[in-house]
Amino acid sequence: MTRYLTLRPDAVAAVLTGDLIGSTELEPKQLLAARQLVLQVTARFEQAHPGIVPGKPDFFRGDAWQLLLADPRLALRVALLIRATLRGELDLDTRIAIGIGTVDLINPTRLSLSTGEAFTLSGHALDHLTGYFELTAALPARAGALAQWVQVAVHLSSGLVRSWTQRQAEIFACALTLDTPTHERIAAALSPSVTKQTVTDSLKGANWRTLLEPIRAFETMDWQAIGGAGTDGETG
């Protein structure tokens, strides 16, 4: 019998629901590699931020996946890290919908069977995601104007990501995982290592400085202020 997990009552969490782009053209080994990479990214992030990932990432419908973050502040960073890692290492990409809201019950082994506002918002947002964006966000209606502004910031981030080259994505992913991502440290952390100038040029082309603004805005937001009853929300 499954033993469900719960968060603090009215605690606000983030659910990331995604599906691989162009999955019908991928071979089984490519799908498996993508799944393994999502798991590796999640494990490394959990190691750096203990307790951030309740349960395990879930995979379903062949090309779809879902991840729960106990702290919404890191949701955009994780979403961009997953996309950057997939593009940098496998030259693959994924659409992602970030749902931010309360959570009822967490199935630790089959996350997609969990219930709660954040799960509903994330799933609906991905279902309604148009071809104009590969990244979106959804908040409950009680968040008011914040729901629209968060969605706008995430959609703009999606547009900046679309132009990444594989090298830019690789270097962007490395920068996201370092505490102090100086160009020298990034250059040395890559395998094989690259020159500082390559890092500088790649980060500029990847819109690193511009994307840091919404990432930091997410990380300084008081998301718990939108906690409360109700599951009615707007999706993107």
Image: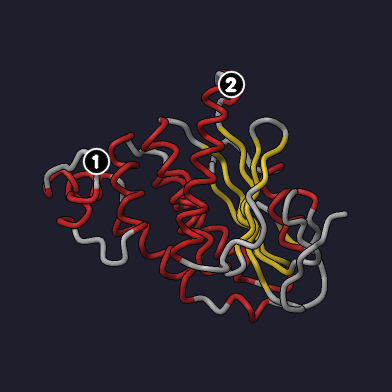
Q: Quadrant of residue 127?
A: top right
Mark 2 lies on a secondary structure that is helix
Residue at the image point whose x is 64% and y is 58% from the top: 68
In this rendering, the answer to whether 209 lies above or below 220 is above
Picture residue at 41% right of the left edge, 44% below the top: 84
Q: Earlier in the sequence, mark 2 or mark 1?
A: 2
Identify the amino acid type marked 1.
Answer: Ser
Residue under the point 48% across and 67% down: 49
Label count reads 2
Residue 52, quarter of picture: bottom right
Relative to 138, 37 lies left or right: left
- Name the image quarter holding residue 32: top right
Q: Is 130 located above or below residue 149 in the figure?
A: above
Q: Callout 1: helix, strand or loop? A: loop
Horizontal and vertical percent position of residue 7 = 72, 72
Image quarter hosting the N terminus: bottom right
The reply, left or right, for residue 97 in relation to residue 60 is: left
The Cα atoms of the two marked residues, 2 and 1, are separated by 27 Å
Q: For label 2, count other residues whose C-alpha is less than 10 Å away and answer few (under 14), some (14-19) or many (20+).
A: few
Where residue 89 appears, as percent x and y from the top left, is 38, 35
Viewer-side residue, 119 vs 8? 8
Q: Amino acid at mark 2?
A: Pro
Q: Which residue is mark 1?
A: 191
The image shows residue 18 at horizontal and vertical percentages of 61, 43
52 relative to 201, above or below: below
Residue at (22, 53) in percent of width and height: 186
Residue at the farthest right position:
1
Whether residue 153 is visible here, answered yes or no, is no
Residue 145 shows in the view: yes
Front one among 182 and 6: 6
For mark 2, what is the residue? 28
Would you say 59 lies left or right of 34 here? right
